[in-house]
Structures are given as C-alpha cells and as structure tokens.
Image (cartoon, helix red, strand yellow):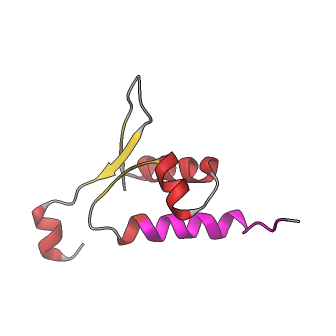
Amino acid sequence: MFSRRPRAADEKRILEFVGEAESFCDTAVSLANRLKVDLRTARAVLDRMVGSGALRRRVYVDIETVYFRYRTLEERKLGA
C-alpha cells in the first residue's frame, strides 16, 4: 500500500516554499509536481494566499492560472 503524507504537511511545505522565495511566479500544476503534493491541495493553498493578499493571481482563458508575487525594491531593502 502507498502511504500518504497528511494534508497539513503538504500545506506547510507549500507555504514554506512560497514564503522563502524572493519572488514567486508559478502555476498550481507546476508547483504540485515540483513539491510532489496533491494538485487540489496546492491550488487551495495558493488561492488562500491570494485571499490573504500574499499572492496575486492572473487567470488566462487558454492556459493554467498563474500565481505570482514580485517584491518591490523597498521590500527587498527592508528584508521583508
């Protein structure tokens, strides 16, 4: 039988990965593949981060939705 990590562990990995990145631009599919987590979990975490203002989302008609955050020069100087 295959064992699965608890969903909370996957959510924590996603939050840490995105939070540690200087800038972030990715799709839920790509992020789920990179971190080896469930796609629905990745999309749910990214959507919550959009809701909290930590990320922004750009929806396209013909390709996967892109989630992104680009820190400003001021934020980089402050180490935020």
- Residue closer to the observer: 35 or 16: 35
Tell me what residue is drawn at x 33 percent, y 68 percent. Answer: 21
Q: Is residue 8 magenta?
A: yes
Left or right of 56, for residue 13: right
| Residue 43 drawn above or below residue 19 | above
Left or right of 26, for residue 12: right
Q: Position of residue 74 (x, y in %)?
A: 11, 66
Q: Position of residue 16 (x, y in %)?
A: 46, 71
Please identify the residue farthest to the top as the structure is shown: 61
Tell me what residue is drawn at x 53 percent, y 63 percent. Answer: 35
Tell me what residue is drawn at x 59 percent, y 63 percent. Answer: 11
Name the quadrant containing residue 70. Answer: bottom left
Look at the magenta stretch and give its main secondary structure: helix
Tell me what residue is drawn at x 48 percent, y 65 percent. Answer: 15
Residue range (magenta): 2-17
| Residue 77 drawn above or below residue 62 | below
Left or right of 80, for residue 67: right
| Residue 39 drawn above or below residue 60 | below
